[in-house]
Amino acid sequence: EKAEIGLIGLGVMGSNLALNIAEKGNRIAVYNRTVDKTRAFYAGAGELQKNIVPTETLSEFVAAIRPPRPLIIMIKAGEPVDQEIEKLRPYLGKGDIIIDAGNANFHDTRRRFQELEGTGLTFIGMGVSGGEEGARHGPSIMVGGTEDSYARVEKVLTSISAKYEDDPCCAWLGPDGAGHFVKTIHNGIEYADMQMIAEIYGILRDGVGLNAAEIAQVFSEWNDGRLNSFLIEITAKVLTAADPETGKAMPDVIVDAAGQKGTGRWSAIEAQQLAVPATVIEAAVAARCLSSMRDERKNAEPMFNKEELEFGIAPGPWLNRDLELALFAAKIAAYAQGFDVMASASQEYDWKLPMPEIARIWRAGCIIRSQFLDEITKAFSDTPDVANLIVTPAFAAMVNECLPSLRRIVAAATSAGLPVPGLASALTYFDAYRQSRGTANLIQAQRDFFGAHGFDRLDGLDIHHGPWGSGAA
Ligand code: NDP
């Protein structure tokens, strides 16, 4: 019996995804460059072996699948994907669908999609979120490609995706790079969420002097409230865990240098390309970079720590409440910015991204899953063409409620010398966004002075240059 679908790449993500597919009753053919891995995978598949066809060459792999064949590629992103497509092509036939499920840059996905256009083959770029656990038991799946090719794989994909209130967290989001773009922004928002949680942790650890267990307690309480989310939940868990080697709290033995694989950075780069302010995401990416410059930070510490600084808010329920609302307000800014980047990309690339649907498929399976996403789905459904999430009535009300807390916390943290780049960017974003008379009038005057770039006047008079005289260059 032929397989329904194929998968290339039995690494961490691919092997878990393949088991998930087999478990949901879909017959799947698998292939991996290193054959030993395929054998080990099959040997360890237990009773799921009945739905798995292990293959050792690409021709054997392709022949094992019923045409038109959906073929998932889940390997190292970048060059390897292009090489794999080249190797596959001689064996493929009309209507076959190549599905790249890795963390591709959406520009590559657009190129690959275009390269296959007119060849009889089609290409799907599919963002998969949720890490190893998600891949095995239900990821969030963001699909870009033709609607027809999605129709061919919809049944399998919705069978393996996470479910939220019985609805699959899997959707077709638009043509070519739409799925990988949305996955990229998902990761950018994830960076922002994690950075701001770390900043709050820093305030509690260094400003207030709590130990890991005490901080865990605070996060654990928040998980029952408006901040309820996977990331808050695991923050409480990692803070509670003890190091088996030393008995210390686990975070207290871990080096403070955060790794990154690039998708957060891509979010910031695309935001800049599209001229969308995504300051919280940018701050989160920059904070990871600075975290990695550990030797420089060590060198600088004795040079600058001359002031006696104190965190000015007394510990206790009031502070915890302020921190909770501050984090919530800042989270709103990060998501508003992420959705703003997606709205702009949607126009630029003519994708028609379905915003309420995106928030819905992030509701389960992925790393940024949270209760808060329900509010976003609702806000974008109620006001589809709104310029920004924060000016929807529901979010404007939330921002008004939480902004004073964010302001107090950022003020207290900066007065205490505690770095809060994410929270501070969020606060500044709100303050700049709601200011009808900003300060760029001065920049326009400067630009006209040195470069005769011209300006518009508030009174509408048709005069576009200043009386700078001979001093102007
Ligand atoms: P792993 O490192 O576990 O596995 C890598 C896989 O890629 C192996 O099957 C490897 O084959 C294959 N591979 C590497 N280079 C080549 C090549 N040149 N030609 C053919 N095959 C190659 O990676 P992951 O499973 O973690 O990641 C796979 C993809 O999923 C990546 O794009 C990643 O960004 C993405 N992703 C990962 C997540 C995670 O949490 N880990 C979450 C979401 C997406 P071989 O055994 O022969 O070396």
Image (cartoon, rainbow, N blue to C red):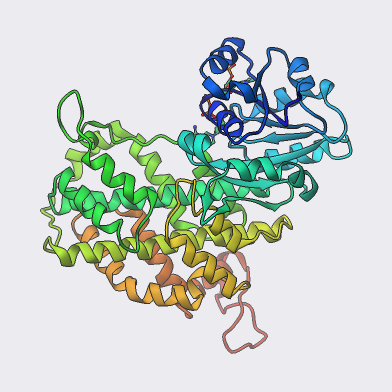
Residue 98, percent across and down?
A: 74, 33
Please, is residue 78 above or below residue 285 in the view? above
> Which quadrant of the figure has residue 125?
top right
Identify the residue shown where x is 55% and y is 75%.
468
Residue closer to the observer: 427 or 448: 427
Q: From this viewpoint, is residue 297 visible?
A: yes
Q: Which residue appears farthest toward the top when viewing the image?
A: 36
Residue 438 in view (yes/no):
no
When the figure is inspected, residue 99 is found, relative to residue 232, above or below; the finding is above
Relative image position of residue 311 (x, y in whole percent): 15, 58
Q: How many marks?
A: 0
> In the visual, does 58 lie left or right of 298?
right
Quadrant containing the C terminus is: bottom right
- Residue at the spot 24% in from the left edge and 66% down from the top edge: 322
Percent of width and height locating residue 216: 22, 48
Up the image or down, 360 lies above or below 381; here it is above
In the image, is 45 to the left or to the right of 260? Answer: right
The residue sitting at 84% across, 21% down in the picture is: 90
From the viewer's perspective, is residue 183 above or below residue 408?
A: above
**Residue 17 position in % (x across, y down):** 57, 32
Q: Nearer the viewer, residue 314 or 308?
A: 314
Q: Quadrant of the N terminus?
A: top right
Pick whichever, 315 or 308, lies toward us. Answer: 315
Q: Locate ligand 1 by image quadrant.
A: top right
